[in-house]
Amino acid sequence: MHLPAVTSSPAPLASPYGGEPGAPVSVMLLGVRVTAYAIISIAEHQRREAAGMGAVISPALLDRLMDLPIGISVTDPMVWAELVDQPRGVAELHEDGARIIRRLESPLTITDVVVDATTGKELRAVQDASLFAGFTRRWIAATSSRIADAATLEAKLCGVGIVDQRRGLLLPAEKPEGLTRDGWSWLLEEKTYRRWLTRRAGNHEQESPARATDGASDAGAS
């Protein structure tokens, strides 16, 4: 499917079953293959393009950046030393060896994730979708409209929505009461952004250069 051009407002594709619009991206997150519906930040995307940057997939780097305000100068010689080898698009470092201005922001917002469920595996799909409980709204897409009672009950308890093969609504998803905002939630967005860039560029994957990609193993960052 052709992905829409990046826009500052939500992309003109409907996310699952009455949710906010977003671009669908098939991606491996937390070891689970999902379709993530993402709203791209045009400002951050264009800023990264201008800086020659793509996705940043280092959990340690993202955790460190979460401690810094965006666009505000702070003085921290230790953090300055940790960021000195990162691409310039990550942060501005003053020549005094102490002052830093964080520039990197999340490139998108994930509004929904959908896990495909084969017949008889709906309960497992619900459990997989539940991994994202603190990050976004969750769904399973079943191949049959007849779902085992155990899977339906688990979905209700976990706030996971269910749709059938034709995307007919069987059970509405609940919005998470409180969203987790940390380095791992940011990493999920970066992984989705990397996949979006890959699709958009015709399978030519883009990532940030140098050390910004260090420390993200397939097992830990997927």
Image (cartoon, grey):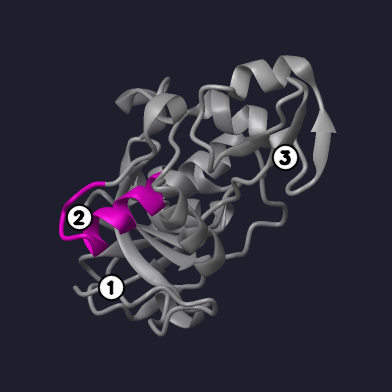
Residue 186: image tag: none
The type of residue carrying mark 2 is: Thr
Q: CA distance from mark 1 to mark 2?
A: 26 Å
- Residue 189 picture location, percent across and down: 48, 49
The correct choice, above or below, for 88 with respect to 154 in the image is above
Q: CA distance from mark 3 to mark 1?
A: 33 Å
The stretch of residues the image draws in magenta is 191-205
- Residue 46 picture location, percent across and down: 47, 63
Front one among 182 and 106: 106
Closer to the N terminus: mark 3 or mark 1?
Answer: 1
Label 3 sits on residue? 101
Closer to the N terminus: mark 3 or mark 2?
Answer: 3
> Dot 1 lies on which element?
loop
* Residue at x 51%, y 22% (from the top left corner): 85
In the rendered image, the quadrant that contains the C terminus is top left
Residue 105 falls left or right of residue 42: right
> Dot 3 lies on which element?
strand
Residue 59 falls left or right of residue 1: right
Q: Callout 1: 10 Å neighbours few (<14), some, many (20+)?
A: some
The type of residue carrying mark 3 is: Ile
Q: Callout 3: 10 Å neighbours few (<14), some, many (20+)?
A: some
Query: Disc 3, disc 2: CB below 8 Å?
Result: no
- Residue 32 picture location, percent across and down: 32, 42
Label 2 sits on residue? 118
- Residue 167 picture location, percent across and down: 31, 77
Report if residue 193 lies within the magenta region. yes
Front one among 142 and 191: 191
Residue 3: image tag: 1
Q: Quadrant of residue 181?
A: top right
